[in-house]
């Protein structure tokens, strides 16, 4: 096990989660923010203030950032459609790369990312913040222990009021129509839309709950309001050998789930041969139903070890111990999730059920 101090750079601030991730680095006893990069300096100001990042660690030139920081880890929070470009630019610098969800805007880009790291000693991790919800971790433990038998169906419903209604640390904002029109979140070329934003969670964690099983075919329908380039609502049905699973994404929920759970509730319902689990976002319990307790019971979520509590502690724990990220954070399972997302996106375009893309 290594106890080396990890030097971390933040690359691109298009995704508001960069502020949350840098906070985890700032609070980690064995990590340091050695540099941040974004083409426009103003986008970095909040993090500069929050974490007292000095001027000589702030860069608007990527090459200068990498040349002057000697970083070990790079966090990427660019627009989704640029993930592959940044991984390819970072790979020659021999840094471990942490990419904030989604994986990519299509499977070809995901495969470019995998290829860029192929044969390298460094790790590539795709972070899904819902992986750190104690509800989902507890649900997975119970599944692995056979409490609900073999998983047959996964039902996923998630989203929020919209990506422009909050920033880092979930600070509330009120987007103007002009901001919405200009934001990358609403641009097709940058991988915008609720399907590409949120379905990866359901598809990748759903694969985790399914024990790695993959669907045979996928059908998706989206709602794309007039005047927008991308969808704000999607519903996907995936057929597995053992039955159907559903994945629904929504920008425009009645409330944000981290404040008040909207209806339908955000999270997962997992149906097994011997029971069911309702795992809703940001809750202190899950709902467990078994043959011994058909009425159901509230089951407290697990108390997590520090390295299981969030993404940066986990990634550093993996690196300290020479381990690759596992489950939905690892490349193999994340790629299955991307296959499902890709097939859903294509299905919505052609309005047909399609076999899983390879």
Image: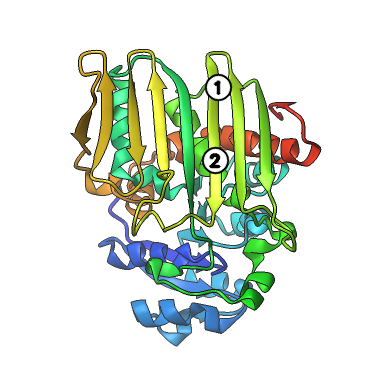
**Closer to the camera, 98 or 261?**
261
Asked if 286 appears above or below 263 in the picture, the reply is above
- Residue 157 in view in this figure: yes
> Left or right: 111 with respect to 280?
right
Farthest residue in the right direction?
A: 350
Among the 4 quarters of the image, the one containing residue 33? bottom left
Among the 4 quarters of the image, the one containing residue 49? bottom left
- What number is the disc on residue 244? 1
**Residue at the (74%, 59%) spot, across then down:** 226
Quadrant placement of the C terminus:
top right
Q: Position of residue 338 (x, y in %)?
A: 61, 38
Q: Position of residue 105 (x, y in %)?
A: 67, 49
**Residue at the (46%, 69%) spot, across then down:** 167
Farthest residue in the bottom direction?
A: 55
Among the 4 quarters of the image, the one containing residue 177? bottom right
Circle 1/circle 2 CB separation < 8 Å: no
Check disc 1: other Cα within 10 Å, few if <14, some if 14-19, many if 20+: some
How was this image coloured? rainbow
**Element marked by disc 1:** strand
Q: Position of residue 349 (x, y in %)?
A: 77, 41
> Left or right: 65 with respect to 131?
right
- What number is the disc on residue 5? none
Q: Position of residue 283 (x, y in %)?
A: 28, 46
**Element marked by disc 2:** strand
Residue identifier under label 2: 248
Asked if 89 appears above or below 311 in the picture, the reply is below
- Measured Cα–Cα span from mark 1 to mark 2: 13 Å
**Residue at the (47%, 84%) spot, across then down:** 56
**Residue at the (32%, 61%) spot, across then down:** 5
């Amino acid at each position: 096990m290594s106890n080396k101090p990890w030097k971390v750079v933040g690359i691109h601030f298009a995704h508001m989660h960069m502020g949350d991730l840098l906070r985890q680095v700032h609070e980690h006893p064995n990590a340091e923010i050695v540099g941040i990069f974004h083409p426009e300096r103003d986008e970095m100001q909040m993090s500069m203030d929050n974490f007292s990042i000095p001027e000589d660690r702030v860069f608007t030139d990527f090459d200068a950032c990498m040349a002057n920081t000697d970083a070990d880890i790079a966090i990427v929070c660019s627009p989704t459609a640029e993930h592959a470009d940044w991984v390819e630019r970072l790979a020659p610098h021999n840094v471990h790369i942490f990419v904030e969800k989604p994986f990519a805007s299509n499977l070809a880009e995901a495969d470019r990312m995998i290829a860029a790291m192929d044969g390298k000693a460094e790790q590539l991790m795709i972070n899904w913040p819902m992986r750190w919800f104690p509800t989902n971790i507890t649900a997975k433990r119970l599944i692995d222990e056979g409490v609900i038998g073999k998983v047959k169906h996964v039902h996923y419903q998630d989203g929020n009021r919209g990506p422009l209604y909050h920033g880092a640390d979930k600070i509330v904002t009120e987007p103007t129509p002009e901001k919405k029109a200009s934001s990358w979140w609403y641009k097709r070329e940058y991988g915008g839309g609720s399907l590409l934003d949120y379905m990866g969670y359901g598809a990748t964690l759903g694969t985790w709950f399914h024990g790695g099983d993959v669907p045979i075919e996928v059908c998706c329908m989206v709602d794309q309001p007039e005047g927008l380039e991308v969808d704000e609502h999607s519903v996907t049905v995936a057929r597995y050998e053992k039955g159907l699973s559903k994945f629904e994404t929504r920008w425009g929920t009645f409330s944000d789930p981290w404040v008040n759970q909207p209806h339908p509730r955000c999270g997962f319902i997992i149906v097994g041969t011997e029971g069911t689990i309702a795992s809703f976002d940001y809750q202190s319990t899950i709902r467990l139903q078994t043959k011994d307790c058909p009425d159901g019971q509230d089951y407290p979520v697990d108390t997590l070890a520090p390295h299981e509590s969030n993404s940066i502690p986990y990634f550093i724990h993996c690196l300290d111990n020479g381990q690759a990220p596992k489950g939905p954070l690892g490349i193999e399972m994340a790629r299955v999730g991307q296959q499902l997302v890709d097939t859903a996106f294509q299905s919505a375009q052609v309005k047909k059920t399609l076999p899983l893309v390879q």
